[in-house]
Amino acid sequence: MLKIAWIGLLVEVIVFNLIKPIINNFEVAAIYFIGINIVFVAISISKNDKKTRFIFYLAYIIRILAMFWDIYARSIFMFPSSGGDSEGFLLSATQIADNPDLFKSNIYGGLYSKILGALFYVTAPERLLGQYVNVLLGLTIITVVYEILTLLDVNEKTKMLSILLICFFPNSIVLSAVLLRENFIVTFVIISFYFFVKWYEGKQNRYMIYSIIFVLLASSFHSGVIGIIVGYIFMYMFYKHDVDELKFNNRTIFVFILFSIMSYVIYVRYADIFMSKFNKVEELQDIYDTANSRRGGSMYLTQFKIDKWWKMILFSPIKCFYFLTSPLPMDWRGVNDITAFLVDGFIYLCLIVYSFRNFSNVDDRKPLLIGISVILLVTIFIFGIGVSNAGTAMRHRHKIFPIIVIFCAVISDCKKMVIEQSKYL
């Protein structure tokens, strides 16, 4: 998980703070800061085999180049997710660095702006530093996915194809290069999922606790990912390691009640932190209003009006499908929408089709696949109902993109095992 790189980054931040009074040009200092950390990154990934090491290096270099492009060449071409929110986060972080009392305020960007503000306060208000943290988070996501696939003993070919997709998926590169909070969320989500898999493989309850903690950390940035915890609870309740099956009995019902009480306590005591995006939902009409909210030029399903609970249920599959695949051809407005679909929505569509076509034919690791299905379905439902804009959908669905890739990789691995076994029958 790039431990050496992150430790090196922390040391650099401390040194930067100590020599801050004698630095004349913070922008040049930030570039040196990044250059030094590249050495720590190289050390971190040097333990991998030659092919994997090359892929990691290439993914890292591309993200650094994309970061510099976003800062210095945006006048030529601006990345789709850059601007707007990113500039708001930068402004808030700069204000916090100048006035630390703003940490206590309800400032634009929330927790993410405060983290950036803390970094800028200790070092300097240079966006290069903030965006480089996202680059490092992007590489961390890649390495954690690799560790998960290794832990699940996925065959080498499938593992490499999955890593290549994670490394060079266009939206992954962009969101690792610009000043947005997505990579913080994805990092906490995938680390949480890593511990979930560790629990599944080894039946150690501490991993169950770790997985929940990291989901809560992710939800403190955006509460939509809290749906992941439903899939975890489902597995913690019903999966039995000794028989590798899902079982339903009195004990699991008791555990369900216990988790329900814990969830309620967390919600009541800490709703302002973990459920900030849901604080305005006080009654059913608020949910309908959210489902009907459409802003921006890339809005979709404008003809749907959800004003009854049964309409929300009825339309949810369509809204979820659009959430995962938009902008679809019927909504294209020009080259940008076509490109967005081909490099993003179409890939999700392929992964969805592959999952549906092959899930029922897989018997091995079925409990794990069912558990991941619950994780994905609940989370997609939450985002699908709340999002009606293709641009926003592209950012939000990326939060679960690594889990979707892992899901398909496990299906592919199990399918290959079945095919190989059939040769000997």
Image: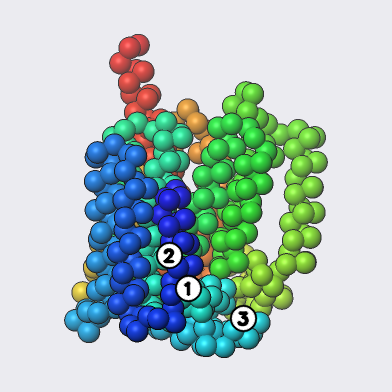
Dot in front, 3 or 1 = 1
Q: Residue 306, percent across and down?
A: 56, 73
- Give the mark nearer the N terminus: 3 vs 1: 1
- Give the mark nearer the N terminus: 3 vs 2: 2
Among the 4 quarters of the image, the one containing residue 409: top left
Q: Residue 147, percent across and down?
A: 43, 41
Q: Residue 333, percent across and down?
A: 27, 78
Q: Residue 180, percent across and down?
A: 43, 72
Residue 91, compared with residue 111, is above or below; it is below
Residue 204, compared with residue 110, is above or below; it is above
Q: Which residue is mark 3?
A: 103
Give the quadrant of the C terminus. Answer: top left
The one nearer the camera, 20 or 84, is 20
The answer for how far apart the CA atoms under marks 3 and 2 are is 23 Å
Amino acid type for the residue under numbered disc 2: Glu
What's the residue at 51%, 79% (across, down)?
121
- Give the mark nearer the N terminus: 1 vs 2: 2
Q: Which residue is mark 1?
A: 18
What's the residue at 67%, 38% (across, down)?
205
Amino acid type for the residue under numbered disc 1: Leu
